[in-house]
């Protein structure tokens, strides 16, 4: 394993040893394909990295793989080498960027303020445009990007999966253990598949849902893709909590994907199309805020202004949209709860561990607000896990594309959460919830997992939780 004071200079590595470059760094620059001219990583941002190594201990991929080039510092070195035509933008170099979870823990940790999030966001489209993928990689990515960002397609896809579960085929497939041998990535996708609820096939919410009592605010709610189908109770709870606290809720029809999934993976054209559609859906709604209850989506929604900064038609609308986006927990702390809360258990006490989703903690800098809300519920006691800021391995679709690394991170996360002795895990992101539930099941641990909005909703309505 590289230590924090071992710094690699690509030019100093002999050609035979430069396997992380995938090329002889001393070849003529014209023979080395570097970044293309469309929004390459900004050299000024690259130069802000002083290679101190503070990022290494907080980087999940470095902690699992132990290799310098799979750390933020190593990847920045590689970006610099590629931008100077000292290294190739090829299959080998792309692998080091692919191992990045995009959790942004390094951004939080960096004492120099390196904007690694912008650097990796600029690098990934370069890879997608210029680096050929293997057939298996193209197939799995094609499935994901043509299915997940489109709720109606995903809903139709859930029908055979619903039958697959009801007929007991899922249990048989998992018992045979054959799928991981055939395709580790398909096995990873199948392994996080939860029990598909019947309400995954229900119609959307009404367009306008009136407040309970005096109207304080008028807000829009984004339903999400996976969230609306597999975690619809979270959306229902979110709407009830908002209306109970004086908010009229607007849910525009025909909402699609917010663009987070393709944006995080460098699928620029697709993400921009989805983002523009989302902006159009909320156009003219006259809202005080746009509310999201999924951490990964929230981070991208707040970045619309930056993502479309070069689009003359949508630039201003994107900035106005992002300025109104609030995570539900962030928003509720700002406006204050106005409705009474009751204990969540018959005994009146409940011990909870809150799981920090990376794009909430590192991307949106939201950490205290969820804890503040949970502590307002009578009888709730919060416990903190070790390595609370370390990614669970979900990271959007990372656990589908890099299942081996994700497995180790998922195991660590569940160990850290359950070692607190908490009776319930609160998680604010659907991907994290799926990953954690999978590893709870693999480890044979029975513990409740709920979204903070479900807990607030129960507390408002006086519903008691049956602790496993």
Image (cartoon, rainbow, N blue to C red):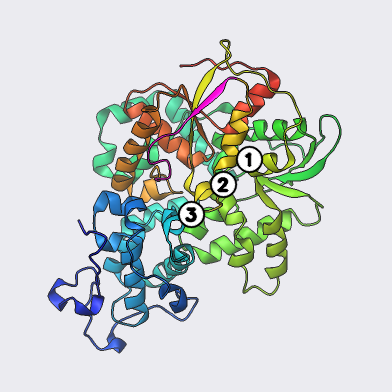
Q: Is the residue marked by circle 2 packed among few (<14), some (14-19), or many (20+) residues within 10 Å?
A: some
Estimate the spatial distance between the alpha carbons at disc 1 and disc 3, rounded to whole Å.
29 Å
Q: Are marks 1 and 2 in contact (CB under 8 Å)?
A: yes
Q: Is residue 286 left or right of residue 204?
A: right
Q: Secondary structure at mark 3?
A: helix
Q: Secondary structure at mark 2?
A: loop
Residue lying at 69% horizontally and 64% vertically, measured from the top left:
319
Estimate the spatial distance between the alpha carbons at disc 3 and disc 2, rounded to whole Å.
28 Å
Disc 3 marks which residue? Answer: 145
Q: Are marks 3 and 2 in contact (CB under 8 Å)?
A: no
Residue 388 image-quadrant placement: top left
Q: Nearer the viewer, residue 289 or 2?
A: 2
Query: Residue most toward the right?
Result: 214
Residue lying at 67% horizontally and 19% vertically, measured from the top left:
342
Image: magenta residue range: 379-390
Disc 1 marks which residue? Answer: 329
Q: Nearer the viewer, mark 3 or mark 2?
A: 2
Q: Position of residue 420 (x, y in %)?
A: 40, 27
Q: Is residue 124 left or right of residue 270?
A: left
Q: Earlier in the sequence, mark 3 or mark 2?
A: 3
- The quadrant of the rendering that contains the N terminus is bottom left
Q: Position of residue 86 (x, y in %)?
A: 29, 81
- Would residue 371 be seen by someone viewing this image from the given angle? yes
For residue 366, which numbered disc appears in the image? 2
For residue 306, which numbered disc appears in the image? none
Indicate whether residue 28 is drawn in magenta: no
């Amino acid at each position: 394993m590289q230590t924090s004071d071992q710094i690699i200079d690509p030019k100093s590595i002999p050609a035979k040893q430069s396997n992380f470059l995938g090329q002889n760094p001393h070849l003529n620059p014209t023979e080395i394909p570097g970044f293309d001219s469309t929004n390459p990583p900004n050299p000024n941002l690259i130069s802000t990295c002083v290679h101190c190594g503070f990022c290494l201990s907080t980087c999940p991929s470095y902690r699992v793989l132990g290799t310098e080039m799979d750390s933020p510092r190593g990847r920045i070195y590689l970006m610099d080498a590629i931008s100077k035509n000292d290294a190739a933008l090829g299959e080998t170099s792309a692998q080091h960027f692919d191992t990045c979870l995009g959790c942004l823990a390094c951004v939080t940790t960096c004492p120099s303020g390196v904007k690694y999030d912008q650097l990796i966001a600029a690098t990934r489209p370069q890879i997608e445009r210029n680096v050929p993928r293997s057939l298996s990689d193209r197939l799995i990515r094609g499935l994901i990007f043509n299915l997940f960002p489109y709720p109606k397609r995903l809903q139709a896809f859930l029908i055979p999966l619903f039958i697959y579960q009801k007929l007991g085929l899922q249990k048989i497939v998992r018992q045979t253990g054959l799928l991981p041998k055939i395709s580790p990535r398909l096995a990873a996708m199948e392994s996080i598949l939860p029990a598909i609820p019947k309400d995954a096939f229900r119609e959307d919410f009404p367009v306008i849902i009136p407040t309970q009592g005096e109207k304080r605010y008028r807000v829009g709610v984004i339903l999400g893709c996976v969230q609306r189908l597999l975690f619809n109770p979270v959306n229902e709870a979110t709407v009830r909590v908002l209306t109970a606290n004086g908010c009229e809720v607007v849910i525009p029809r025909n909402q699609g994907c917010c663009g987070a999934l393709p944006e995080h993976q460098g699928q620029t054209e697709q993400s921009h199309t989805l983002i523009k559609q989302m902006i159009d859906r909320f156009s003219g709604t006259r809202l005080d805020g746009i509310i999201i209850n999924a951490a990964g989506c929230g981070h991208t929604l707040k970045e619309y202004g930056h993502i479309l900064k070069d689009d003359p038609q949508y630039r201003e609308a994107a900035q106005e949209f992002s300025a109104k986006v609030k995570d539900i927990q962030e928003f509720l702390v700002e406006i204050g709860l106005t409705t009474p809360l009751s204990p969540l258990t018959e005994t009146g006490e409940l011990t909870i561990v809150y799981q920090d989703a990376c794009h909430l903690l590192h991307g949106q800098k939201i950490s205290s607000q969820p804890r503040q809300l949970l502590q307002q519920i009578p009888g709730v006691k919060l416990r903190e896990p070790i390595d609370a800021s370390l990614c669970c391995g979900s990271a959007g679709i990372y656990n589908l594309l890099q299942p081996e690394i994700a497995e180790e991170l998922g195991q660590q996360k569940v160990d850290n959460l359950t070692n607190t002795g908490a009776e319930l895990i609160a998680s604010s992101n659907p991907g994290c919830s799926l990953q954690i539930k999978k590893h709870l099941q693999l480890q044979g641990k029975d513990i409740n997992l709920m979204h903070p909005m479900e807990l607030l909703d129960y507390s408002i309505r006086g519903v008691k939780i049956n602790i496993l």
